[in-house]
Amino acid sequence: MSSENDRVDVLVIGAGASGAAFAWSLAEAGIDVMCLDQGGWLDPASYPSTEDDWEIRRQTDFHPDPNFRRLPEDYPVNDSDSPIAPLMYNAVGGSTIHWSAHFPRFHPSDFRVKTLDGVADDWPVSYRQLEPFFDLNDRIMGIAGITGDTAYPEKSPRQTPPIPFGRLGDTVASGFDKLGWHWWPSDSAVLTAAYDGRAACNNCGPCDIGCTRRAKASTDVTYWPKAVAKGAVLQTHARVREVTVGKDGLADGVVYYGADGQVHRQDARVVVMACNGIGTARLLLNSRSPSFPDGLANSSGLVGKNLMFHPYAMVTGVFDEDLESYKGPVGLSLICQEFYETDLSRGFVRGYAFQVLRSSGPVHTALGGISGHTIPWGEEHHKIFADRFGRTATFAVVGEDLPEERNQVTLDAQLTDSDGIPAPKISYRMSENSLKMMEHGVARATEALEAAGAHEVLVNPLLRPAGWHLMGTARMGTDAKVSVVDQNGRCHDVRNLFIVDGSIFVTAGAVNPTSTIQALALYIADYVKSNARDILG
Amino acid sequence: MDAYSTRPASVLVESQRAVLTDVLDRLIPPAGSLPAAGALGVADYIDRVLAGSTDLRRTILEVLLQIDATAGREHSRAFSELEGSRKDAVLRRVETVEPEGFQALLRQAYNGYYSDPTVITSLGLEARPPQPAGYELEAGDLSPLEKVKRRGRMYREV
């Protein structure tokens, strides 16, 4: 094993949404910070959207599922015991490379579910505590939107105007208006005007295969250039095998495989996990030692437990009118939060949102679009294709699935990555409450699409390739017996080990989590900076 | 499916290519200015894909074998010698018996057909990738938001 010599003050593992925000915050304060990531830098100019085979690349080397993509920097996930397949990307920028950049915040009520609804647990932080960090994060990422949304406390001004609706947005909004339901232009981490040296979106569509214009706020084009300019060191193609501990029970560094295939060691005063809701649990469980035989920071037994996805139902309306729905950012137009807050008369607790999606190109349409209804082959093929292409709007019904210990990440007994590191296995079941919630959501989505004029509605009640949001496997809390980290992201068991990704979520809310993940990472970074003397020595 | 690349054609022998072309013509028949998939040459596309993927090669060649075998078993003739409705009946039988393999073939047929510039142009689209040109998009009407605002606060105070 070779050593990388100098001990760093803070070592961050993972260069995605949370790791980038955290590293930038510390670097900006002049703190010595290094980040290791198993992936490398990608060149936006080479993304598939500039190539004729862009719709094929989505199914191969830009597939969102690492089990299909199988790039050298990916690790496999045994998802055979889950109706939802986890999705992620491994590169500088992490999953923000392929995300669709929908950027809603959690609601104030999401942090107080026990108090308000008597379920799960309250978070040890509140919306108001995170609010300055939501705002800070918005400024760095650059958010398109419009203030005044009645589903939230008033937000700070958005950096650029909202994403254009197009005909699709106008049509769908008319349905919501007929029913008197809430809707609002989506907060989107995609610029509609030049900002901070980045170009505006030109509505090309497939944000999920990378943004050549840098209009989409993947962290390789937002946080990382700023962090590196302030002295942060980012080492790529460095796959961490384990976090090591000294005789004092504190983390003292990591062991990782470098680009040369050799085992290396990096010492650190503080270690920060930012590997996503599956990767962080995997790494902690792989970091066993005599002091921590069940995995690092796992005296509660909760590392890997309480995995939360957002279950997604996809409800597609087919319209007579040409909506040109293949134009514009595929995941970004409107959001409806009419059914977000708890109303027990609906038959379930907590709620869901509708994220209104556009469609995509001809290949994607023929293969069934995002709801997966493949266009039949044979004599009717062309008629049905013409009926759907550019004429669909899809409601993603995004539900809150509450934490349950049976939903978990463990280590697979056989499966490994290319370096031989044990791979994760996930086990997941949806609760009765969630099933009722999704059934309600599908019915209401159908109602809204029909009100907007859809002549046909296609339903996928639970989308399998929908595990974009990975949460809950190292939850926050003030009681060390029932949580992994405290209210500052600091592990109860290992006081110089922090976790800043979606693992620490106590509950899942019913909106995309990246805005909240990053706000939380900045909040924890602020704590580290404010207590640097104690934490860094 | 594993990650594959399109490489020079090298997989299909003449008889396999002939069956595949006939199958493609039934999967996506001609309509107006739109050609049938076989006549368009989608078999060449699939051949290149199969050259880059061992898994897919095995799967799709097996499906082609099943198609010809089913035609022989049920109609005592080669698939290519059957009339259209009987070809379709054979394909539906194989689709039922070998759903995963058939879907893999159908996916490649759609990939090849709808990536072809001739088809894209016939659909009234520009045969180009999304970038660098992008698209013009209508801004949309924000005035109905006033109605949403009048309904008042939607979130719960805590």
Image (cartoon, coloured by chain):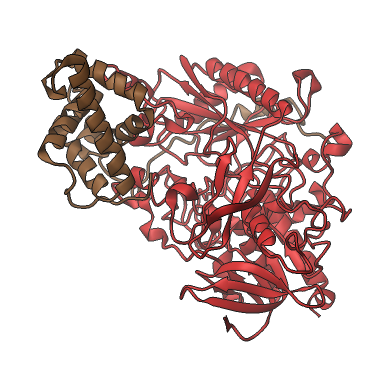
Chain colours: A red, B brown
Counting from the top left corner in percent of width and height, residue A7 is at 67, 83
- Residue in view at x 31 percent, y 43 percent: B56
Instruction: Pick the residue in front: A332 or A174.
Output: A332
* Residue A336 seen anywhere in this rendered image of the structure: no
Work out whether residue A497 or residue A349 is closer to the camera in this orientation and state it.
A497
Q: Nearer the viewer, residue A121 or A218?
A: A121
Q: Can residue A175 be seen in this view?
A: yes
Please identify the quadrant where the C terminus of chain A is shown. Answer: bottom right
- Total marks placed: 0
Q: In this view, does A36 lie above or below A83?
A: below
* Identity of the residue drawn at 23% across and 22% down: B70
Q: Where is residue B34, by image quadrant? A: top left
Residue A492, given in percent of the width and then of the height, sits at: 83, 61
Q: Position of residue A431 (x, y in %)?
A: 71, 30
Say whether residue A119 is left or right of residue A427: right
What residue is rendered at 44% in x and 61% in y? A72
> Could you tell me which residue is drawn at 31 percent across and 50 percent down?
A51
For this orientation, the residue located farthest to the bottom is A5
- The picture quadrant where one finds residue A345 is top right
Q: In which quarter of the image is the N terminus of chain A?
A: bottom right
| Residue A340 rendering spot, x and y as whole percentages | 72, 31
Q: Is A160 rendered above or below residue A387?
A: below
